[in-house]
Amino acid sequence: MSNQSQNNPLEFSVRGIVLGILITLIFTAAQVYLGLKVGLTFATSIPAAVISMALLSAFKDATIQENNIVQTIASAAGTLASVIFVLPGLLMIGWWSNIPFWPTFGACAIGGVLGVMYTMPLRRALVSQSDLPYPEGVAAAEVLKVGTQSRSGAQEGKAGLWAVIWGAVASAVFALLGAAKLVAAEVAHFVKVGNGATGLGASSSLALVGAGHLMGISVGMAMLVGLVIAWAVLVPLLTMANPAAPGVALADHALGIWSTQVRMIGAGTIGAAAIVTLATLAKPVIGGLKSAMESSRRAKQGGGDVPREDKDLPIFIVGLVTLISMVPAGWLLSSFLSGGPLSSISTPLVIVGIGYILIAGMLAAAVCGYMAGLIGSSNSPVSGLAILSILGAATSVGWVGREIMGPDTAQALIAFALFVTTVVLAVAVIGNDNLQDLKTGQLVGATPWKQQVGLIIGVFAGSCVVPPVLELLNHANGFAGAPNVNAISDQPLAAPQATLISTLAKGVIGGDLKWDLIGYGALIGLALVAIDFVLKKSSDRKYSCAPLGVGLAIYLPSAVTSPVVVGAIGGYFFEKAMRGKKHGEAASRLGVLVMSGFIVGESLFNVALAGLIVLTNKGEPLAIANSMSEATTMMIALAIAAAVVVGLYRWSANSARAIEA
């Protein structure tokens, strides 16, 4: 086996598949938590590639292609967890009181398989014959090449594994101090402005600092602009316009106005920015699809043998799997409706639902796949696609159910629209990921069809984890805006994206959306699009102000956005200090891995804490009573976080220097 020829390297191995599945299970759990807390997910390909290379380097015959299959399987974790942007909405509207395993598993798995099938025909046009940059796909390929080719690369692989471990341990310990009430969970300060109020909070979370570093300075600056718009302009103005009742604290007044009014403006900004982003991509996507059809026609006429690096799953299998998937999809939708107030119209609803999954899913997968090529999968405006999908699903479902409209049926129609959107979103995010993985594969000489099978394995592994982790967090914490009858802790998770999407679904079907606030937000969004365009044009694409980043910062709580901005600025200065040094590139790669570790460690600690909350039936099982004031615990939180971040950046630089020496 070990002396396999160059033209047929080892790709699929039992150890690789098992390792890929294990990494998927761990990362999916971390992603689900992060997404519910802050509404963001992170790219798992690079940390997965590093862990895989460090562990498989123990085997003499491990190949770069085998490591690539491990990261392909594991990358499903990052993307599949995005379905939590919609699912908690079913709890918020009171349709579900807990998360059932099979419907959730089915929605994730069917959507994921369709995502791979729909983007397969696009591979030639969007990957092998296109000049799209694929920033994250190329970065993952670089990590694989560096780690498997040279002796210093093997050393860096080991240092990389330690980087993930140190980052994970540091953030888990910091989260443990927060759970023990020894550091403040949030550092916040509110001030009076005229007869209004405003302020800023920052969650004590190393995971968010890590997310900021990974998103980079341009997204960080866009979020800073959003923070300024929300907390320096909108909150002071609206709190002055709606003065507080006597006895209401400053913080409660500011946060109350923000959550009822400013958030809806933010939703409008996100919606407008997402629609414009998608519209600007329409021309290149359509062009790309046309050339895909052309090239597949040419390949048919040319005949002859297709080289191994260009073999997809046969198109006949793709069509067959797509058609067969419609059977469980139909069964899933009809069982979702059976016995409910909509059972009388379940047949037309299921037909509309399946049609929507087929057509909207195809469009979403194509657009999302193109975006992975343009800006990388963790920056893709998935939330924008989710907003468009729920508007489309709610409109078409509402149209079918217009005959029997009433309070019960309205709730059931909203639930059905959310469920259909979950499937469409799974299609979109896996399509996005498939093309990014195929780009990595193309750069390391992998076989496309083997990668596509690998991704499907990852989809099934991830689909097994999403429901139990969601249910555990639902039982331990619950979600903001849901009845949370069974939740033990009194600190529900924010689930910001699901809140937005269920609000939109209710608004479309019930007809009570605050259109005026959304309209103001949309105007801000369009103004930002114009500013972004001018910035890019005048600075030759050096500077930009991503309108979606700004909208998210208006919509997400400042406690979530502030640490992300801090992380982005910290990362920028670290990269700047390393630029031009001999060990600079290795140091910045290690920095990325430490930050990924921050996310994984804290998220996994919090999933474990949720397990502990359920076992002990206590809301704060680790709290240690102490007499420190809130201000003191805030100062301690800031000091420890700063020390950890600076210390680990220095460790990255020193380790890189030792490797390159």
Image: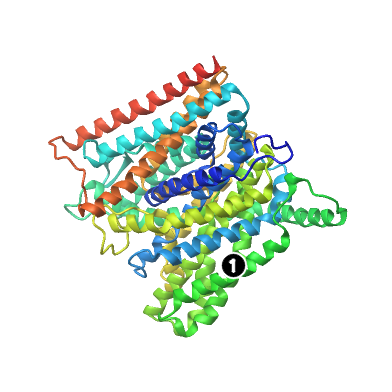
Farthest front residue? Answer: 1
Residue 495 at x, y percent in the picture? 38, 54
Give the residue displayed 65% in from the left and 41% down from the top. 10
Image height of 96 relative to 58, above or below = below
Quadrant of image for the C terminus: top right
Specify whether 641 is left or right of 9.
left
Residue 68 at x, y percent in the picture? 60, 41
Specify whether 363 is left or right of 305.
left
Specify whether 243 is left or right of 22.
left
Residue 524 at x, y percent in the picture? 49, 51
Residue 472 at x, y percent in the picture? 33, 56
Farthest left residue? Answer: 627
Quadrant of image for the N terminus: top right
| Residue corresponding to mark 1 | 325
Q: Residues within 10 Å of mark 1 (few under 14, many from 20)?
A: some
Residue 188 visible in this rendered orientation of the protein: no
Amino acid at the residue labelled 1: Ser
Image height of 290 relative to 12, above or below = below
The residue tagged with tag 1: helix, strand or loop? helix
